[in-house]
Image: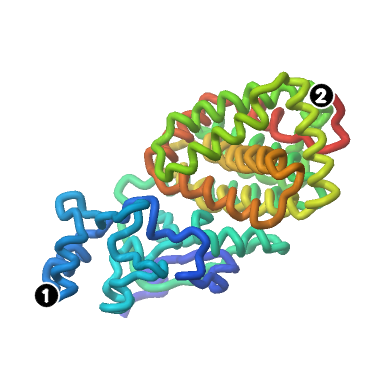
Amino acid sequence: MSTDFERMLSDMRYTIPDYYQHFRCAADRCEDTCCAGWQIAIDGRSLRRYARIRGRMGRKLRKSIHWNRAVFRQKEGKRCAFLDEDNLCHMYAELGKNSLCRTCRLYPRHIEEFEGVREITLSLSCPAVAKILMNRREPVAYLSYEKEGEESYGDFDLLLYSVLADAREVVLDLLKNRALPVEQREEQMLSLADAVQKRHTDGMLFSCQELFCAYGNGEGTLAAAWEADGRRIRARLPFMMKLFSCLDTLELLLEDWKNCLDETRAFLHMGTADSYAGICLEFGTWLKERMPEWEIQAEQLLVYFIFTYFCGAAYDGRISAKAKLAAVSRMVIEEMLMARWMKNEKMLDSEDVIETVYRYSREIEHSDKNLERMERIMEIVPANLTSYVSGFVPPYTV
């Protein structure tokens, strides 16, 4: 009979967001189907199963798969060969849910695995998920449960993961502290991540607990950075111009993404620093008066990116870069919303927010090359610069 300790070692802990069970696929009602625009990879097990299917569906499968590349072929408009005119999956209709490959079966679930831990989130690239999170007003909580099963992760750095998990808890608490403006919470996040990064680099991870206590007690704020004036907003323009130039270098997954980048540049980045600062201040005032929920939506975005990716630094050591990517993701989405606001004659609604969020997520999160490239870029962006240019809401003046 195994001991309690042995049973504990054999358990795998699963963590999910508390809105996980609220997700329902919109299927043919989805405004932007996940079965078009990007290639769907087929896992080896499904590929072998498809090769054994006979009859009419077997013939269609053989014609509808790039067997050497292990992806489904696409029709006009980059639509999956099995996506019908009503935006429903023909394979699902004919062969049932179990016929789907792993990619289709799991999406929009995103899984991060560590030793003894499996964290499952719902990707913002799905319009239905973006709608759930952007319409949510309560802070997000994460629920854990255990199931039997153990997996080995070789040279996994358990100490670093343990420190990162503790750091993430502190960061999430900071981000959900609604007594402070979201930009200030973001600065605390960046400051703490940078401090943990330095301790990791210097081989001083054991000293992080006192750091967490300090931030948990409110001693980790960046008061000096909040003595901001028009210089802060003017500095944002060259930063955003360079950032959008970097976005141009990423792998393009959907053609309309380039139009989103070009639209933002056309409405915001063609003028002077003063004209840009004026737009920022007017937009910040409009958000505060007409769309105050953006403060909560920005929090949800930061919490999502931190929970999903921060502990992944256990594999690559890019602690600060992952925090900066969360901040920059929020900033890019905000920048695109500001351009959309200009285009819409200074109006926005919740659908604009949801669409911008899932479009950004599709381009950045669904390409390993793009995530890697963005984190590499974040490594050379000073944390204080990211925080310095992040906010432009009143009472700042030019």
Residue 71 shows in this picture: yes
Q: Position of residue 45 (x, y in %)?
A: 20, 64
Q: Which residue is mark 2?
A: 230
- The foreground one among 32 and 324 is 32
- Asked whether residue 193 appears in the rendered view, the answer is no
The image quarter in which residue 279 lies: top right
Q: Residues within 10 Å of mark 1 (few under 14, many from 20)?
A: few
Q: Amino acid at mark 2?
A: Gly
Of the two numbered discs 2 and 1 in the rendering, the one whose residue sits closer to the viewer: 1
**Which badge, 2 or 1, is on the more N-terminal residue?**
1
Question: What kind of element bears circle 1?
Answer: loop
Q: Residue at 30%, 49% (x, y): give it.
A: 154
Instruction: Answer with left or right where residue 6 lies relative to residue 386.
Output: left
Q: In the image, what residue type sits under mark 1?
A: Arg
- Give the quadrant of the C terminus: top right
- Residue 54 has which mark? 1
Residue 41 circle label: none
Task: Work out whether 344 lies above or below 101.
Answer: above
Q: Residue at x 61, y 55 (%)?
A: 354
